[in-house]
Image: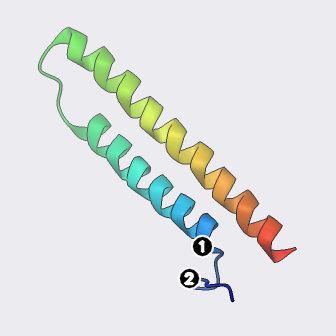
Amino acid sequence: MTFDFFGIAPAAFVMACVAAVSALGGGIIIARPARSEAGVYGKRIAGTMALAFALILALFAWGLEHAAAG
């Protein structure tokens, strides 16, 4: 017996949720004001890393979903 959430495989659903949370976190990091010049660069690096992580996880979730469907 397999469970699916909204027609999505469980592993792909979990990956998609983590990707969404990471993208939200990256957006929040980038949107917050920096308090120093070094903070600007740190914010850019941290936000970019969080958004890249979200993109990688979203692509992986998409791949899992297509592998499960086929």
In this view of the protein, which residue sits in the foreground, 29 or 63? 63
Circle 1 crowding by C-alpha within 10 Å: few under 14, some 14–19, many from 20: some
Q: CA distance from mark 1 to mark 2?
A: 7 Å
Residue 50 in the figure: left or right of residue 55: left
Q: Is residue 14 left or right of residue 3?
A: left
Q: Are marks 1 and 2 in contact (CB under 8 Å)?
A: yes
Q: State the colouring used for the structure image.
A: rainbow
**Residue 30 falls in image quadrant:** top left
Residue visible at 39% across and 55% down?
A: 21
- Left or right of residue 25, residue 70 in this image: right
Vertical placement of 28 versus 1: above or below? above
Which amino acid type is marked by label 1?
Answer: Pro
Above or below, comparing residue 9 to residue 22 in the picture: below
Residue 51 in percent (x, y) is at 47, 40
Farthest-out residue, front: 1
Residue 34: percent from left, percent from top: 17, 24
Q: Secondary structure at mark 1?
A: helix
- Label 2: state its secondary structure: loop
Q: Residue furthest right?
A: 70
Residue under the point 65% across and 59% down: 61
Q: Residue at x 56, y 69 (%)?
A: 13
**Residue 70 x %, y %:** 88, 73
Extreme residue toward the top, this view: 38
Residue under numbered circle 1: 10
Seen at 41% across and 48% down, the residue is 22
Quadrant, the N terminus: bottom right
As displayed, is residue 27 above or below residue 2?
Answer: above
Q: Which residue is mark 2?
A: 5
Q: Amino acid at mark 2?
A: Phe
Looking at the image, tell me whether mark 1 or mark 2 is earlier in sequence order.
2
